[in-house]
Amino acid sequence: MTWTQNYDPLGFWPLSTLVSALPVLTLFFVLVVLRKKVWISALSGMLMAFLLSSVVFGMPASLIGYSSLLGFVFGVMRIAWIIVASIFLYHVAVETGQFQVMKDSIANLSADKRIQVVLIAFCFGAFLEGTGGGGAPVAIAGAFLIGLGFPPFQAAVLCLLANTAPVAWGAVGNPIRVLTGVTGLPEHELSAMVGRILPPFSLILPLWLVRSMVNWKQTFEVLPATLVAGLSFAGMQFYWSNYQESGLVDIIAAIFSLLVMVAFLKLWKPRSILEVGEQGRVRAQVPQHNVWEILKGWSPFIIASVLIFIFGYPSFNKHLRFEALTFPLTGIHNAVLRVPPVVPQPTPEAAVIDLNALALPGTAVFAGAFLAMPFLGMKFRRGVVLLAQTFRQLIPSLLAISFMVGLAFVTRYSGMDTVLGLSMTHTGFVYPFFGTLLGWLGVALTGTDAGSNALFGNLQKVTAEQLNISPILMASANSAGGVMGKMIDAQSIVVSSTATQQVGKEAEIFKAVLKHSVVLAALVGLLVMVYAYVTPWVVPAMPQQAAPIVSLLK
């Protein structure tokens, strides 16, 4: 039995669009207006998706159930796993006393909180995004900032803001590979185009971060540092995406920026030191540690970061995967048909469960924590107890993630998210702007840039060809615009609130980052408009048309 998606069930696209938005609107209404717990809000949104999928879209009840089950498994494996692992790693570092050494090493490099947030949230966070993604940048960097003394709420907001520009090449370039898979467009040209859209935003992001927590006067006091961090990262991001391959863009750019910042901070200090919780005073002497002590202090995160990189690298990752653990979910696999204009011809939607936990970045973090424990003097039994305590602490957040991803998968398989995307194709001349916002919407709905590319990548290509706009530009705009939606997607909000011990304040976090997300997405859209109509020579020429290949997001 197959069921075909209907992208205008009410026969009037504005009304169909409004109905399709109700599940997400319900979630945020319950969260922000009624101020209920996040898991209750997610459950409310998922139940609304169930109702509309059945009553309005005519989706069979069995397919609704299977799609939510698929989302639940995906949420546990791809999101909850990395959250538990990251918080566990942090607890190991704290209990063994090494986190204090880490804090001292950062404070000795710079005692100024404005520079600390650039080093941790921007540079280190970008490295974590490039190696594994999956919530690790927000979870680990957020816990780190709290350890440095940042207010938990502020740490959550800052890490969400920082985890934007690197997202297009997250998890060793997976979003770009997915975009290539669903569009058939050449990977190098797509990576290069994204690498011509995002570097200006990478350049200003450190300045944006600092300004979000202090006034303009205090921001300009550290302007040299923010420019050095942004310029070094943006420059390497542009170079590697345009002249090298797409897998290591974030990793190389982050390492390069970190090294440049370390060298720069040996030569330059801000005139006044702004400590965490202070309005500006000279810091007391911080304990000094030798190189060995610093390496030992950082060892849990060093080991975890190296393992994330190794586990995530495609040529190694394939050896961690077993075919028996990846199998179609009978009852929904290839039972839902996507139809034009979203795809060139009616195409069955795959529904595959992937239980290859060994290949996930969360497993690499767990391995890093357990490998570091004996080196740091923690007994294995104590580590197991600490892990159990971490899991109990995170149960409400894990429930919220399960419901949210269940909601996302029901809207995906019912076609509601596609209806929202198609509504933006009615914008004509200004489509480059709204097409960019389509990528932003996709990440806000799916929680991943790769998911947004899989959902809307081919739609961007088809619409661009109809409007005589470069499909390379619009497919890339989907990915580049999507990164600005990362900070407001419900899953990222839950990760940030959990990692920073702000469970119950998800609504406040969402409201704090929403304005940044909208403004940055709009700026990306305007830049894409310029590339489309003013400087089209910036867009890479498309080589011989490549045939579409199977989506890598299976």
Image (cartoon, rainbow, N blue to C red):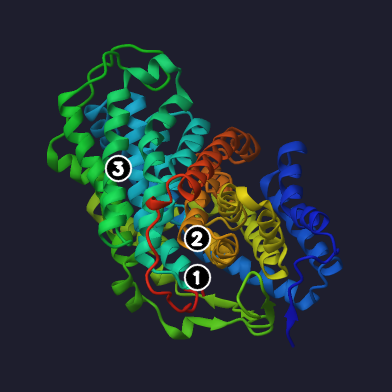
- Tell me whether circle 1 and circle 3 mark residues in contact (CB < 8 Å): no
Q: In the image, what residue occupies the spot 80% across and 76% down?
A: 60
Viewer-closest of 475 and 519: 475
Label 3 near label 2: C-beta < 8 Å?
no
Q: Quadrant of the N terminus?
A: bottom right
The reply, left or right, for residue 343 in relation to residue 122 is right
Residue 371 sits in which quadrant? Answer: bottom left
CA distance for labels 1 and 2: 8 Å
Foreground: disc 1 or disc 3: 1
Specify the amino acid type for callout 3. Answer: Phe
Q: Residue 15: image x %, image y %?
A: 83, 55
User: 232 or 129: which is nearer to us?
Assistant: 232
* Percent of width and height locating residue 303: 26, 55
**Relative height, residue 7 to residue 118 (above, below):** below
Q: Is residue 458 visible?
A: yes
Q: CA distance from mark 1 to mark 3?
A: 28 Å
Check disc 1 and report the residue beneath it: 183
Residue topped by disc 3: 233
State yes or no: discs 1 and 2 in contact (Cβ < 8 Å): yes
Q: Left or right of 133: which side holds 466?
A: right
Q: Earlier in the sequence, mark 1 or mark 2?
A: 1
Secondary element type, mark 2: helix
Pointer 2: residues within 10 angstroms few (<14), some, or many (20+)?
many
Q: Identify the element where label 1 is drawn.
A: helix
Q: Nearer the viewer, residue 392 or 265?
A: 265
Residue 167 in percent (x, y) is at 43, 52
Q: Residues within 10 Å of mark 3 (few under 14, many from 20)?
A: many
